[in-house]
Image: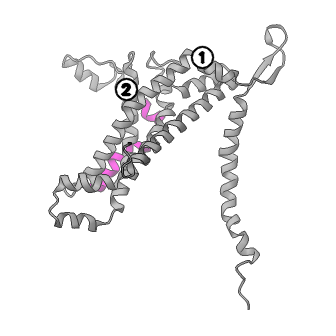
Amino acid sequence: MTRPTAGAPGRRHAPLLFFGPFAVVFLAFFVVPIGYAVWQSFTGVRRSGPLGLSESETTFAGLSNYADALTQTGFTESLLRILLFGVVTVPLMIFAAVVLALLLDSAAAVWPRFFRTVYFLPYGIPGVIASILWSYLYLPELSPILEVLQKAGVTVEPLAGDSVLWAIANIVLWEFAGYNMLIIVAQLQAAPRELYDAARVDGANAWQLTWYLKLPLIRPAVVLATVFTIIGTVQLFAEPLVLKRAAPAVTNDYTPNVSAYNQAFTYNDYGLAAAEAVLLALAAFALSFGFLRLAGRGGRPGGGGR
């Protein structure tokens, strides 16, 4: 009985058997929808007849949808609003995740597995459900927290005016800080324990271990968590959409994703919605790529610039 040679058909086709199903699913549910959205962003609908009630015709619109999106005050304001949201939320998210991870990894941590589960638990709650839960805590008529504050002489209206943006930020921090913490904890636990033992033998205290050993070790995990947070911030959708019923300040174009959703399903302008979605994807790519370049430059010796 002879063994198959290295060039046997079975061995040559084995990678295709493993990669093929993934490639089909990836093309069908990722590449094709993106390609269709890009194509749709260049199309428009022309209606003829009295009052435009006759049959509609899909036409090539060129860059007009992109021009309309960028000249709409509501959409451009939503981009600036989400940028402000990210400038505040992303650093707070990463700071909270790093602090929680370091606390769980410290030698003095009590019940680390229990608290790791507690911190991660909010991530298991869908964003819509979390927003509904927090909306009750934000309503003065229903919230026990606001009731206590009112009795203490402090009046807080989380869903009024500009405050609603930071009410949404609180929900997002509550949801995802534990998820990012888990990424950083995994990086800490992957580090060899001998490094910590050697540092302690050399006389390093807990602060020196954290500053000179743990923080440099978790840098790749922090970069990854930051990229995830940037992308998630740009895609903010469920929280403002749910709070819209209780917060009059949340408009139909409060965030770029909400604007694209309403353009498609409220105003039936799918071309403009697709253009806004493409612009949002480009913004997410630019911000993530820019941060990765900045992080990569800072991680190289002498990367601080000339």
Magenta span: 111-131
- Local secondary structure at mark 2: helix
Q: Position of residue 246 (x, y in %)?
A: 44, 20
Q: Where is residue 2 in the image (x, y as percent from the top left)?
A: 73, 89
Task: Examine the rendered structure and indicate whether residue 165 appears above or below residue 219.
Answer: above
Q: Position of residue 196 (x, y in %)?
A: 24, 63
Task: Examine the rendered structure and indicate whether residue 119 appears above or below residue 80.
Answer: below
Nearer to the camera, 117 or 286 = 286
Dot in front, 2 or 1: 1
Decide: few, some or many residues near mark 1? Use Cα within 10 Å; few <14, some 14-19, many ≥20: few
Task: Examine the rendered structure and indicate whether residue 237 appears above or below residue 295.
Answer: above
| Amino acid type at image mark 1 | Thr
Disc on res. 80: none
State the quadrant of the C terminus. top left
- Local secondary structure at mark 1: helix
In terms of sequence position, does the residue under pointer 2 or pointer 1 come before the other?
Answer: 1
Nearer to the camera, 51 or 295 = 295
Disc on res. 167: 2
Residue that label 1 marks: 71
Whether residue 177 sits left or right of residue 10 in the image: it is left
Whether residue 139 sits left or right of residue 60 in the image: it is left
| Residue drawn at (28%, 55%) of the image | 214
To which quarter of the image does residue 37 belong?
A: top right
| Residue drawn at (30%, 51%) of the image | 215
